[in-house]
Every structure is written in structure tokens, then in C-alpha cells.
Image (spheres, coloured by chain):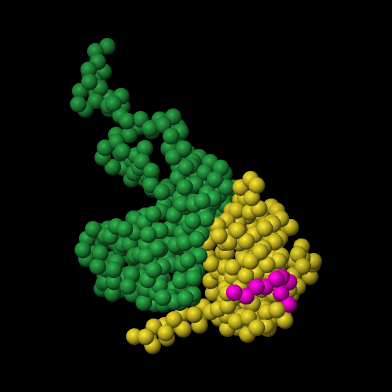
Chain colours: A green, B yellow
């Protein structure tokens, strides 16, 4: 058989096959291992960007009860790290954001199963709490913390990245979504975010991280808010307008006086992260996803 | 820091005020949503409970699994408002207090006042630190509920904050108010 490589693919006879022979292969076993380790590490070790902000706010806090609480939070981070034990007993439901290059070929199994197997192994071997029920109304525990909520994004190239983010429901339950009117504008968005934080009060274990999604559709805006929580606290929105809005919202939230655990203080939120997407002429969707001070995520690249 | 040991009699808690820092020692019990539902079902039917409630404390916690050689995994509080529909019945049945996080509904505050009980808060999300105060843990009921089973814990110097005292003073209201007034006075 005549066989010749060409730019587009492999020529077999006179049929051009996709260039699978040249594609980067990623083994499912490798993915499982990466997810497993990330689940454990995310639950034991606070991300450095979160730790730094906590440290800074602790230095700025003046209310005694608030200082005392922030000090305990810092101690907890140290104990969890040293003893490799979960920062919080609610080791969460796991969200996985997969960014997969279109030139990657997953081999040796099924990608979704490989990810869930990683969660299963991580939660078993890492002594993490299993907090997922099989059915929202007939609530039987799956006993292995699967399934994860998986989001896929296909990008050019042959990279393979995952962000593994276990999240507790004390804060998840305090999240809100509303389809505002375009006329509500920036003020409408601000009012909605502040109201969500105010209503959440002490329940999401402040100090919190506030993820805000603006735009897109009903479903898109919720995932924007979640995505906003995965951005390191050290990074601001790239757009000047939204960067300012982040700063304004953070300042206004910290004026509320809710404070750590809701007992007063200036440290209510560590950061406000906003993510946006184009939307329809008739709509202004906004979503607020609240995270606690145990703001866990772990990025891995294979 | 005020040191307290369970069982908590009226005498021991009558001077505690919302905002006090407490170190609690002795025996306490764990229970969360599913265990509460079962306890209250038994009370409604007039049946015996698997644990004695008189002057006892229930900690709203579903710990993470214990590593080999350890007593318990991480063990911080879960959000209390989910237990609000059940708490008044348990207080009426003799329970002295609860440990959780987050504010309580009016019906719970009323039951606390009526029964001279109290509500402690453990700091949410410092579960590794809190586990250090837990010296013994054994499942005493509802093993089938896994992390939600009722456990008897032996604690030593468990760091808590009195959030609602026996007179109904609530730190969730007064703490923030005091902070804001103090800020205003300084401005
Ligand atoms: S909100 Fe966060 S810190 Fe609080 S109990 Fe849940 S996971 Fe833990």
C-alpha cells in the first residue's frame, strides 16, 4: 500500500485519514492518577494565593473577635498541611474543568470514567468525606463522592489541562442567579451581588470569595460565576472597567461589617472575581457563586 | 477563656453571655440532618431515643473519615439552620445546647430562652484544628448513615464561642452592630 504523510493527514491509497498517527496520546490511567492526587492535595493544602490574601487581611483587621477567628483559620491551614488532613470536613462535591486540545487523542478508556475513577480513588485513599447522593430527592449516598460535575472546553493545540475544585455546600447553597433587565445596568448588578452576600450572612463561613458571572444565557451565567471562583485571587479581570467593578464591589462588601463568621469586622470577602460573556439585547443575566475561605482548587497539566 | 465541662446544668451556664469564648470538655454527641429527622420521629411517636438528652450538647458535624491510628478526621461544624425545624423539639426534651455555625431561626431562639439552653458556634472551616480537641469518638446510633451517624465524642478544650445565650442574646445581631457602631465612633 502506498503510504505518505502529508500536512493534513496520512494518505492511505488515495484516502486521506485524519492524522491520528501524529496526534498526542493521553492515557486514561494518567488522567485518573492526576485527578486522584489533585482531589487530595486540594483538600489538604490551601492555594498559595488564598493564603497570602488571608495573611494580609489578618494584618489589617482591627476587631478583636475577627482577628481571633482569622488567627484560627491560619492555624488550621498549618495543621491541615502538616498532618495531610482535610482543611474542612466538608470535602465537597468536585467540579472538574477540562481544557482539552483538539489534537489530543484520549486512549485506553473513557475520559469521563477516568475522571470519576480519579475522584473515587482520591476520596477513598485520601480519607475525604463522601458527600454526594445519587438522586436529589431519593437521597442515597454514592459512597465514593462520584460523580464529579465535569465541564469540557475544546481548544486548539495538543494541551490537556484540568482544574479540580472540590466545593462545600455551606457556601454553594448561598449562591444566587437572576435575569435582570438591561435597564437595571451596573447598579442593578451591584445591588444584586451585595444582596446575595448580605443574605448569605454567616452561612458560607466568611471570609468568602465572591464569583460573579454577568451575561450569556441562563445556564452560561452560572458557569461564568463558577469560573470566576477558579481565577487566582492575585489576578484581576483583564478589562479595566470590570477590574474597577471588582474593586468597588469588594470595598462595598467589606463595608457591610459582616466580618469573619458573621460576628463583625472588616474582613467579609477576600476577593470579588467577575467573568463576563456577550448576551442578548433583551437580557442581563447575573449570577453570584459564593465560596468560603477554604477556597480549594488545583490545576494540573498533562 | 471560660472552661466548661458537660453535662451543662443551668447553674454552669447561667452566667455565660453571647460573645464569650469557651473551652468545652466532656462528652458531646454528633448529629446532623438525617439523624435529627429520626430523633424527632421517635419523639413524635413517644418512643425512647438512642441517646440521653438531659443537659447534653449536640454538635452539628459530619466528620471526614479517620485515618488509621487517628480518633477522627476533620470535624468542623455544618450550617445550623437546616436543623432549625427539629431543634426546638429536642430542647423541649431536655437537650441543653447545640454547636454549629450560622444564625438560628426565631423558633430556635424562643426554645433556647424557654428551656434555658444555649447555642455555641465553632468556627466554620477550621475542621483540622477542631479535630485536635476530640479525644475519642464512637458511633452510638444510626451507623447506616455513615458520616451522619450519631457519635459520642470525648472532647478536651474544644474552642467555642457562645452565639446565643440562655436569655436569647444573639451575637449574630450584636457582634456586627457593635463593630459598626465602633467604626462609626472612630470615624
Ligand atoms: S462553607 Fe466551606 S468552610 Fe464552611 S463548612 Fe462548608 S466547606 Fe467548610
Query: Count of labels shown?
Result: 0
Residue B150 lies, with reference to residue A116, above or below; the image says below
| Percent position of residue B131, x then y | 60, 58
Horizontal side of residue B29 vs A239, given as left or right: right
Q: Which residues are magenta?
A: B1-9
Q: Is residue B168 magenta?
A: no
Q: Nearer the viewer, residue A7 or A57?
A: A57
Residue A67 lies, with reference to residue A27, above or below; the image says below
Looking at this view, name the residue that lies furthest to the bottom.
B185
Q: Quarter of the image for the N terminus of chain A: give it.
A: top left
Horizontal side of residue A99 vs B164, given as left or right: left
Q: Quadrant of residue B152?
A: bottom right
Identify the residue at horizontal 34%, vertical 65% (top origin): A272
Residue A242 lies, with reference to residue A42, above or below; the image says below
| Percent position of residue B130, x then y | 58, 61
Q: Quarter of the image for the C terminus of chain A: give it.
A: top left
Identify the residue at horizontal 47%, vertical 61% (top origin): A74
Q: Nearer the viewer, residue B171 or A170?
A: B171
Identify the residue at horizontal 45%, vertical 45% (top origin): A38
Horizontal side of residue B88 vs A213, given as left or right: right
* Residue A150 can be seen, yes or no: yes
Q: Is residue B2 magenta?
A: yes
Amino acid at each position: 500500500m502506498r503510504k505518505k504523510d502529508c500536512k493534513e493527514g496520512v494518505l492511505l491509497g488515495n484516502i486521506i485519514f485524519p492524522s491520528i498517527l501524529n496526534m498526542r496520546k493521553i492515557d486514561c490511567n494518567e488522567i485518573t492518577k492526576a485527578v486522584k492526587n489533585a482531589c487530595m492535595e486540594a483538600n489538604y493544602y490551601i492555594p498559595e494565593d488564598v493564603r497570602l490574601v488571608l495573611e494580609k487581611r489578618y494584618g489589617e483587621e482591627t476587631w478583636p473577635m475577627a482577628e481571633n477567628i482569622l488567627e484560627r483559620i491560619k492555624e488550621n491551614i498549618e495543621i491541615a498541611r502538616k498532618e495531610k488532613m482535610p482543611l474542612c470536613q466538608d470535602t465537597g462535591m468536585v467540579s472538574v474543568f477540562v481544557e482539552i486540545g483538539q489534537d489530543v487523542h484520549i486512549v485506553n478508556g473513557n475520559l469521563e470514567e477516568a475522571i470519576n475513577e480519579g475522584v473515587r480513588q482520591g476520596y477513598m485513599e485520601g480519607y475525604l468525606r463522601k458527600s454526594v447522593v445519587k438522586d436529589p430527592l431519593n437521597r442515597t449516598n454514592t459512597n465514593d463522592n462520584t460523580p464529579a460535575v465535569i465541564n469540557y472546553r475544546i481548544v486548539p493545540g495538543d494541551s490537556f489541562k484540568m482544574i479540580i475544585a472540590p466545593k462545600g455546600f455551606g457556601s454553594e447553597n448561598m449562591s444566587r442567579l437572576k435575569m435582570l433587565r438591561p435597564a437595571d445596568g451596573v447598579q442593578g448588578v451591584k445591588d444584586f451581588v451585595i444582596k446575595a452576600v448580605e443574605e448569605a450572612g454567616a452561612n458560607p463561613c466568611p471570609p468568602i470569595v465572591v464569583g460573579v458571572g454577568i451575561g450569556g444565557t441562563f445556564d452560561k451565567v452560572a458557569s461564568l460565576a463558577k469560573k470566576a471562583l477558579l481565577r487566582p485571587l492575585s489576578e484581576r479581570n483583564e478589562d479595566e472597567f470590570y477590574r474597577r467593578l471588582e474593586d468597588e464591589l469588594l470595598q462595598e462588601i467589606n463595608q457591610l461589617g459582616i466580618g469573619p463568621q458573621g460576628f463583625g469586622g472588616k474582613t467579609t470577602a477576600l476577593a470579588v472575581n467577575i467573568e463576563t460573556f456577550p448576551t442578548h439585547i433583551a437580557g442581563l443575566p447575573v449570577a453570584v457563586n459564593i465560596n468560603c475561605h477554604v477556597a480549594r482548587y488545583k490545576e494540573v497539566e498533562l | 477563656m471560660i472552661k466548661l465541662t458537660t453535662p451543662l446544668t443551668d447553674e454552669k451556664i447561667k452566667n455565660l453571655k453571647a460573645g464569650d469564648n469557651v473551652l468545652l470538655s466532656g462528652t458531646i454527641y454528633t448529629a446532623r440532618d438525617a439523624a435529627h429527622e429520626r430523633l424527632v420521629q421517635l419523639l413524635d411517636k413517644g418512643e425512647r431515643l438512642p441517646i440521653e438528652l438531659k443537659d447534653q450538647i449536640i454538635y452539628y458535624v459530619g466528620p471526614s473519615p479517620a485515618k488509621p491510628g487517628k480518633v477522627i478526621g476533620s470535624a468542623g461544624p455544618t450550617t445550623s439552620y437546616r436543623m432549625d425545624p427539629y431543634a426546638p423539639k429536642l430542647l423541649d426534651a431536655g437537650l441543653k445546647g447545640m454547636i454549629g455555625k450560622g444564625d438560628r431561626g426565631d423558633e430556635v431562639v424562643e426554645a433556647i430562652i424557654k428551656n434555658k439552653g444555649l447555642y455555641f458556634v465553632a468556627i466554620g472551616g477550621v475542621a483540622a484544628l477542631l479535630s485536635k480537641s476530640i479525644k475519642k469518638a464512637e458511633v452510638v446510633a444510626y451507623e447506616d448513615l455513615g458520616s451522619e451517624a450519631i457519635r459520642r465524642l470525648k472532647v478536651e478544650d474544644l474552642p467555642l464561642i457562645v452565639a446565643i445565650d440562655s436569655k436569647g442574646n444573639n451575637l449574630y445581631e450584636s457582634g456586627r452592630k457593635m463593630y459598626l457602631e465602633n467604626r462609626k465612633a472612630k470615624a
